[in-house]
Amino acid sequence: MPIQTGFSANIEYLQENSYGGGLYNPSSVTYLEKPSDVIKNILLTADENPEVLFSISDVDGVTTIGKQKEYTLKIDYLLQQGNTALSEAINRNTDNDLNSYVFIITYGGKYYTIKGCKANTIEVRGEVGEPIIVSTEYIAKEVVVSSTDPLSSYANLRHANALNGTYATYGGASVARGGGTYGYGTRTFSVTINNNLERIYKVQGNKIDNLVAGKVQVEGTLDIYLEKGAQTEFELVENLNKANIVISFGISNPTSMTLSNSTFQSLELKMNNEDAVVVTSVPFVAETASVS
């Protein structure tokens, strides 16, 4: 039997019509979606949280029980035109919550149906000459493994098509704050959004009953070139200046990410005779994030 390699996986997803409900048969033909045509990494983790029980009659364990089950799914992919996974992971719905999704992973001749997925953390990062990478970690309710295609039970579901869209590269992106660019420009950026999902368990079972999005936390870092004669970002730190950061991806759908009311946390203004170009790394926080 040949050894399993990491080059035979596929991932696609569908919005659930109820939390943890998984796949369903829609009224008309519906195609699943792909996060991107280039998936860098998939990590599916199952934690049974076992506990060995002891009795006062012996030093050896009596039995082992499983407590709350924990499943996480992490996906790293290149941001691509036609991608909706980024906005679905960040933008809240009308209940100020996140929609839930079911993912289907095909790997090693098996199908992994991952139900009740909501995005807990999202990282978007870019640097000069490199594509923009999105890393999303989902918390899930349940994982079902089968040898047959789960879509075969649903007449109106179809596997996802390729996006075939342009990839977002940092060479085609731009970063602006308060309507203007930073100094001479931005060399790299990294943004992390934490949805702080709260797990809800019931005594009837050991699986997550629901996930509720909590307070959003947004933080990131910009590496910026300082421009001679311009207002330094040092003054912005001193004055606790707040303004929106807009990261334009250079593609359509999605076009940009807005980090509302961002505030610089700290800044080092380096002056020496070694660096020909002055680059400073600026950490920041923001009040909220949205993708359009």
Image: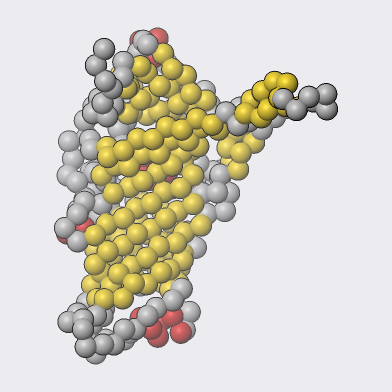
Give x and y (percent) for residue 231: 31, 86
Instruction: Specify the farthest residue to the front.
Output: 59
Nearest the eye: 115 or 43 = 43
Residue 180 placement: quadrant: bottom left
Residue 87 placement: quadrant: top left
Nearest the eye: 274 or 139 = 274
Residue 24 placement: quadrant: top left
Count of picture labels: 0
Nearest the eye: 40 or 236 = 40
Looking at the picture, does residue 29 appear above or below residue 17? above
- Which residue corresponds to the image point at 41% horizontal and 69% vertical from the top-left? 283
**Is residue 274 visible in this depiction of the protein?**
yes
Indicate left or right for 98 with 10 as reference. Answer: right
- Which residue corresponds to the image point at 28% horizontal and 49% vertical from the top-left? 133
Looking at the picture, does residue 233 appear above or below residue 102? below
**Is residue 172 visible in this depiction of the protein?**
no
Instruction: Specify the farthest residue to the right.
Output: 56
Looking at the picture, does residue 151 appear above or below residue 166? above
Give x and y (percent) for residue 244: 39, 67
Give x and y (percent) for residue 185: 23, 72
